[in-house]
Image: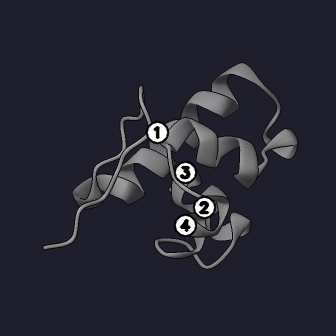
Amino acid sequence: MLIVKQKAGSNYQHSNVKEAWLNATQSHIENNEAEMISLRALSKKVGVTPSAAYNPFIDKSALLLAIAI
């Protein structure tokens, strides 16, 4: 059995990582400029490593496109 440790305060769950990325990005855009988005900063909000963004999204542009749709 695989045990995944989660950072305290993280809202990430394996089943909703894409949704967690979208929520964190939407929240960031509402409070900041979209051009200032950092996958590293968003990954801290989601509670995953920065490279985990590339699982549900091919790049930052794909993440922003998903928010726009």
Please name the amino acid that badge 2 sits on. Leu
User: Distance between the Cα atoms at labels 2 and 1?
Assistant: 11 Å
Res. 43 mark:
none
64 up-or-down from 27: above or below: below
- Residue in the image at 68% along x and 73% along y: 59
Secondary element at tag 3 = helix
The answer to which quarter of the image holds residue 42 is top right
Q: Nearer the viewer, residue 65 or 58?
A: 58
User: Distance between the Cα atoms at labels 1 and 4?
Assistant: 15 Å
Residue matched to label 2: 63
Q: Are marks 2 and 3 in contact (CB under 8 Å)?
A: yes
15 up-or-down from 27: above or below: below
User: Distance between the Cα atoms at labels 1 and 3?
Assistant: 9 Å
Please name the amino acid that badge 1 sits on. Asn
Marked residue nearer the N-terminal end (2 or 1): 1
- Residue in the image at 41% along x and 46% along y: 20
Q: Residues within 10 Å of mark 1 (few under 14, many from 20)?
A: some
Q: Nearer the viewer, residue 60 or 10?
A: 10
Please name the amino acid that badge 3 sits on. Ile
Q: Position of residue 54 (x, y in %)?
A: 58, 74
Q: Position of residue 44 (x, y in %)?
A: 61, 41
- Residue in the image at 34% along x and 50% along y: 5
Secondary element at tag 1 = helix
Residue matched to label 4: 52
Secondary element at tag 4 = helix
Q: Are marks 1 and 3 in contact (CB under 8 Å)?
A: no
Marked residue nearer the N-terminal end (1 or 3): 1
Q: Position of residue 10 (x, y in %)?
A: 41, 34
Residue matched to label 1: 23
